[in-house]
Image (cartoon, rainbow, N blue to C red):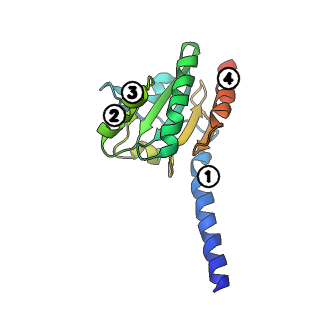
Amino acid sequence: MQGLKTTLLGIFLGIIAASSLAASDLAGQAAPDFVLKSSTGENLRLSEYRGDVVMINFWATWCGPCRQEMPLLNDLFNRYQRVGFSLLGVNIDDDSRRAMQMVEDLGVDFPVLFDETKAVSKLYQVEAMPVTIIVDREGIVRYVHHGYKPGYEQHYLTEIRTLLRE
């Protein structure tokens, strides 16, 4: 019985590790282009942001850490937008109305896009929430972050500043 528990624990930890590293395969690769409808009703295309440092944050309304980090991301957006930084929040909820309510409640200023079919999330190998991807001015994925814990925004800040200086 103990051997079975150990084997199952090993399998479980392997699955967790594999899923947390999946999108990391994107680092160093060209960011896959996409078009999604935004909260303003217009379609936005990632490639239109070429020349900016772009953060893509995949989130959902049911994700507690997503709700926790969103005001911090909004602060980064407002602070660095004038110097070539863009932030695209990609919501994966099936119903965009819940997402719009959360965006309104939190006072989010950055563009929010809706991936109701999960096609873009699959393109970016997103398997857990939130996932934050930072793309350089040339359209190359430079950083991939899985999950959120207080303090992660300091990593984002350092990475954004580094890429803005390049």
Q: Residues within 10 Å of mark 4 (few under 14, many from 20)?
A: some
Which residue is the site of mark 3? 44
Q: How far apart are marks 3 and 2 (CA)?
A: 20 Å
88 vs 75, nearest the viewer:
75
Q: Distance between the residues labelled 1 and 4?
A: 24 Å
Residue 25: give x, y in percent of width and height.
61, 47
The reply to whether residue 51 is visible in this rendering is no
Residue 49: give x, y in percent of width and height.
49, 23
For marks 4 and 3, the one nearer the N-term is: 3
Q: Residues within 10 Å of mark 3 (few under 14, many from 20)?
A: some
Residue at the spot 38% in from the left edge and 30% down from the top edge: 105
Which residue is the site of mark 2? 101
Say if 9 sits above or below 4 in the image.
above
Three-letter amino acid code at the position of disc 3: Leu
Three-letter amino acid code at the position of disc 1: Leu
Q: Distance between the residues labelled 2 and 4?
A: 31 Å
Residue 37: give x, y in percent of width and height.
33, 31
Residue 90: give x, y in percent of width and height.
43, 36
Q: Quadrant of the N terminus?
A: bottom right
Q: Distance between the residues labelled 1 and 2?
A: 31 Å
Q: What element carries label 1?
A: helix
